[in-house]
Amino acid sequence: VQLVESGGGLVQPGGSLRLSCVASGFTFSNYAMIWVRQAPGKGLEWVSVIFGRGERTYYADSVRGRFTISRDDSKNTLYLHMNSLRPDDTAVYSCAKRGYGSSWNFDYWGRGSLVTVSS
Amino acid sequence: QSVLTQPPSVSAAPGQKVTMSCSGSSSNIGKNYVSWYQQFPGTAPKLLIYDNDKRPSGIPDRFSASKSGTSATLGITGLQTGDEADYYCGTWDNSLSAVVFGGGTKVTVL
C-alpha cells in the first residue's frame, strides 16, 4: 500500500489550492479516506472524510464551507480542494486509509504535502 | 482544544513501564472503538492499536491498550529509547460526525 500526496506549496491568503493523494496496493473504491493536517509543532487535526464511492462526506468545523473533499475511484485518487485559505491553514496535509474492520482506525498514511499560506 | 484529552508528556527510565490516558465523552470513546498512533518527528503516523486493544501484525506486545467507559489507556512496557515519539489516540464522534484525535502525548525515555 502506498499513499502519495502532491499539490502543496506557497499560496497567498484568500487563495486556492488542490491537493491530490494517489493510492496504490489496495482496492481504493472500497475504503473511506481522510485528510489530516499537522501545523508546525502541533498535533494531528482531522480535516475531512469521504466514504467509499463518495457516498458521504464530513468536514471539521474549521474548514467547512471552504474545503471540499472528493475522489476519483477510476484514478485511485483522493482530492482536497481548498479555497479562501488563511494563514492558520498552514500545515502538512496527509491522507490516510481507513483500516481494519468497521472501526475508525487508519492503517496507512501518506508522508504529506506542505501548504504554506502567507503573503 | 482537542475533543480527546491526553497528557502532554510522560516519561520513564529504560526498561520501565509507561502509561498514558485518553479521555473523551459518551459521544466518542463511550460509543466507539479507540485507535492509537505512534509518530516520530517528520514521519507519518503509524497505527499501533485498533479496536481498543488489538495490535496490527508487526507491533510488539510491549504495546497494549484498554478502554473503560469514556477513557482509554495505552501502555508501553520494557521502554526503549526507540519508543521516544508522540502518541495519539483517535476515534469517531457521533455528535460531531467527525474523526477526533487527542492532542498527543510525548514519551521521553529518561
Image (spheres, coloured by chain):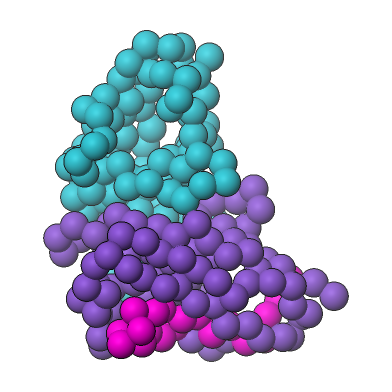
Chain colours: A purple, B cyan
Residue B18, how many percent across, how many down? 38, 22
Which region of the structure is painted magenta? A69-89
Residue B101, how many percent across, how many down? 41, 55
x 24%, y 37%: residue: B58
> Front-most of B27 and B41?
B41
x 60%, y 51%: residue: A42
x 30%, y 85%: residue: A73
Q: Quadrant of the C terminus of chain A?
A: bottom right
Asked if the stretch drawn in magenta spans residue A75, the answer is yes
Compared to residue A13, the image places residue A106 above or below, namely above
> Front-most of B7 and B79?
B79
Compared to residue B15, the image places residue A1 above or below, namely below
> Front-most of B51 and B47?
B47
Apparent side of residue B73 relative to residue B13 in the rendered image (left or right): left
Residue A102, quarter of picture? bottom left
Residue B61, how many percent across, how many down? 21, 27
Q: Quadrant of the N terminus of chain A?
A: bottom left
Asked if the stretch drawn in magenta spans residue A27, the answer is no
* Residue A49 seen in the figure: yes
* Residue B26 seen in the figure: no
